């Protein structure tokens, strides 16, 4: 372990007078659990250790030097013989940095299991994903991962890791509290804390809910993340334990779902994407798509395509996405492509149907008539579905069309959408004429 908290048991004979003092190093952690939030720099740490106490008064020294622990959040509870173990208070001695003393009154001699909880800063996590499309691109294997990064100053060995998705509202930043020279400002004398700090009380609500989500996992099975709704939060519990050393990051598997149905769609809209065709991939977080147990945390998805039975992959694209609630669909922009091409050409333009304010005066209205041909090519080895949007400079227009296309619909006041489905390595060509009405001709269009 790179750094270790130094915890000492000082056996005290009598209430105030010291006799022989035995310094005993506390045994290493039996278990440690990390509950890491992603919306705030805050982690709730829960340690189980076994203290060796003597009947009477005991003092426990706790040091957090070179870490980002918030000392005001420290709390300790006995896990056995609670009726005979009284953890009276936690004192911060003056002129001694990074040190707290717990006063413990014990009615027994021997080992006592205790649980120590506190908040720390410097631990974070983020989600990322890998999607592998089948050769026909109708389904996708979706793999989710989380990367946990530890810059807290403390190594956590064999830690059970839990991740919280959701907004956390805290008054003080844990890192700022951890970096104070003194836990509660400039000391005038010993400072005693007999009750848990507000931050630890708030975080413990999630901790208790996490207990309900905990289970016993088979050691030889693939690790997974168990999920449970906690009011405004979602808790992801990673199976098993991992050692996360300070200064390092570790990738942990979240989920692995095969044959998720997906929809591939190519979009063309000059005003939005320029002259390129942009590829989109969509799926829903629901049971039909073999998902839907819980929301999916936002992250980056990298998409590949399986190209042969040997398992070779070709890179397709990537897209960041936000939190996906249950039963909602997500459409991912994978970027421009070169193997699907849309080429519009203006073939004819004219103006007609002039109206005048009065004979011989200024023009008050007119029509503009444009004729376009659009060629669409699919050079891929699988079919492609393409949406082509054409925008007009006014909401007053009529359109006529002819040629080889599948569907045509009015998208909004000034946009029309053509939908084309192309077989592998084929092309289509169609033509449309749009008449737009300007000036006083708008009234004629309305009528």
Image (cartoon, rainbow, N blue to C red):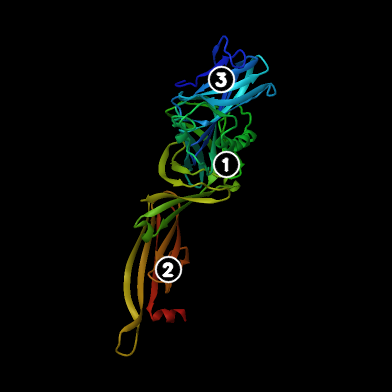
* Closest to the observer, 298 or 445: 298
Seen at 62% across and 25% down, the residue is: 88
Q: Is residue 219 visible?
A: no
- Kindly identify which residue carries mark 1: 234
Q: For the residues carrying marks 3 and 2, which lies nearer the camera in this image?
A: 3
Q: Whole-Å distance between the Cαs marked 3 and 2? A: 74 Å
Seen at 50% across and 50% down, the residue is: 330
Q: If you read the primary sequence from the N terminus, does the residue marked by circle 3 or circle 2 appear first?
A: 3
* Closest to the observer, 275 or 203: 203
Q: How many other residues sit within 10 Å of disc 1, few (<14), some (14-19) or many (≥20)?
A: many
Q: Is residue 221 above or below residue 137?
A: above
Locate residue 406, reporting x and y percent: 47, 63
Locate residue 125, reporting x and y percent: 48, 36
Locate residue 437, reporting x and y percent: 39, 77
User: Could you say which quadrant of the image residue 399 lies in?
Assistant: bottom left
Q: How many other residues sit within 10 Å of disc 2, few (<14), some (14-19) or many (≥20)?
A: some
Q: Which mark is residue 414?
A: 2
Disc 1 on helix, strand or loop?
strand
Q: If you read the primary sequence from the N terminus, does the residue marked by circle 1 or circle 2 appear first?
A: 1
- Kindly identify which residue carries mark 3: 60
Q: Whole-Å distance between the Cαs marked 3 and 1? A: 36 Å
User: Is 65 placed left or right of 117 in the picture?
Assistant: left
User: Is 366 placed left or right of 67 in the picture?
Assistant: left
């Amino acid at each position: 372990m790179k750094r270790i908290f130094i915890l000492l048991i000082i056996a005290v004979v009598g209430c105030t007078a010291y006799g022989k003092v035995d310094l005993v190093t506390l045994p290493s952690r039996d278990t440690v659990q990390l509950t890491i939030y992603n919306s705030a720099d805050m982690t709730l740490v829960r340690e189980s250790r076994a203290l060796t106490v003597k009947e009477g008064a005991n003092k426990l020294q706790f040091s957090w030097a070179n870490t980002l622990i918030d000392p005001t959040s420290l709390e300790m509870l006995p896990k056995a013989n609670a009726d005979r173990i009284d953890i009276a208070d936690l004192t911060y001695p003056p002129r001694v940095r990074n040190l707290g003393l717990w006063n413990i009154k014990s009615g027994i001699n021997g080992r006592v299991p205790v649980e120590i909880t506190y908040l720390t800063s410097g631990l974070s996590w983020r989600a990322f994903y890998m999607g592998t499309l089948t050769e026909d691109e109708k389904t996708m294997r979706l793999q989710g991962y989380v990367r946990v990064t530890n810059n807290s100053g403390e190594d956590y060995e064999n830690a059970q890791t839990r991740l919280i998705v959701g907004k956390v509202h805290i008054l003080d930043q844990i890192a700022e509290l951890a970096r104070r020279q003194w836990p509660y400002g400039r000391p005038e004398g010993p400072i005693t804390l007999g009750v848990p700090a507000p931050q630890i009380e708030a975080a413990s609500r999630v901790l208790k809910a996490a207990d309900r989500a905990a289970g016993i996992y088979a050691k030889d099975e693939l690790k997974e993340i168990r999920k449970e709704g906690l009011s405004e939060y979602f808790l992801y519990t990673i199976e098993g334990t991992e050692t996360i050393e300070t200064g390092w990051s570790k990738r942990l598997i979240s989920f692995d779902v095969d044959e998720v149905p997906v929809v591939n769609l190519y979009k063309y809209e000059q005003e939005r994407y320029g002259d390129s065709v942009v590829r989109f991939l969509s799926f829903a977080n629901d049971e039909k798509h073999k998902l839907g147990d819980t929301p999916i945390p936002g992250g980056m998805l990298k998409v590949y395509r399986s190209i042969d039975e040997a398992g070779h992959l070709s890179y397709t694209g990537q897209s960041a996405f936000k939190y996906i609630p249950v039963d909602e669909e997500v459409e991912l922009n994978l970027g421009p492509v070169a193997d699907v091409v849309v080429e519009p050409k203006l073939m004819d333009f004219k103006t007609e149907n002039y109206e005048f304010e009065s004979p011989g005066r200024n023009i008050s209205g007119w029509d503009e008539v444009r004729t376009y041909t659009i060629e669409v090519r699919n050079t891929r080895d699988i079919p492609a579905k393409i949406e082509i949007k054409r925008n007009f400079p006014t909401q007053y227009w009529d359109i006529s069309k002819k040629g080889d296309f599948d569907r045509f619909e009015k998208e909004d006041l000034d946009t029309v959408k053509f939908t084309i489905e192309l077989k592998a390595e084929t092309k289509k060509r169609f033509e449309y004429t749009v008449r737009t009405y300007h000036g006083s001709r708008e009234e004629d269009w309305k009528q």
